[in-house]
Amino acid sequence: MTGPADDADATADAAPAAPAAPAAAAASVAEEAARRRRLAEVFGDVLPEGSADEPHPTGRDDRWYEENRPPHHGG
């Protein structure tokens, strides 16, 4: 037989959890960063850091790289 006391216990169990403390949030961020590092070690980078239309970090254009391509890379 269920009564008001049983309903109160069910409501208390369904209450949302208290917000995480800042230390717990920082640990979560560190855990996520560690997880990403492990995935990158196994699978490599899925997406490049830059796109083809972005300038090269050295300031050199594609022509310079083509002119200075090592012979074993063809061309």
Image (cartoon, rainbow, N blue to C red):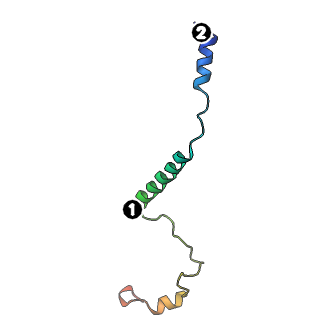
Name the residue rendered at 62%, 16% in the picture. 7
Where does the C terminus fall, quadrant-wise? bottom left
Q: Which one is in front, 25 or 46?
A: 25
Q: Residue pushed farthest left?
A: 72
The part of the image, by quadrant, that contains residue 10 is top right
For label 2, count other residues whose C-alpha is less than 10 Å away and answer few (under 14), some (14-19) or many (20+): few
Whether residue 10 is situated above or below residue 46 in the rendered picture? above
Q: Is there a contact, CB below 8 Å, between mark 1 and mark 2?
A: no
Whether residue 67 is situated above or below residue 40 in the rendered picture? below
In three-dimensional space, the C-alpha distance between marks 1 and 2, rounded to whole angstroms, equals: 55 Å
Please tell me whether mark 2 sits on a helix, a strand or a loop: loop
Where does the N terminus fall, quadrant-wise? top right
For label 1, count other residues whose C-alpha is less than 10 Å away and answer few (under 14), some (14-19) or many (20+): few
Residue 29: x and y in percent read 52, 52
Label of residue 27 in the image: none
Q: Which residue is mark 1?
A: 41
Name the residue rendered at 61%, 32% in the picture. 16
Name the residue rendered at 43%, 59% in the picture. 37
Please tell me whether mark 1 sits on a helix, a strand or a loop: helix
Label of residue 2 in the image: 2
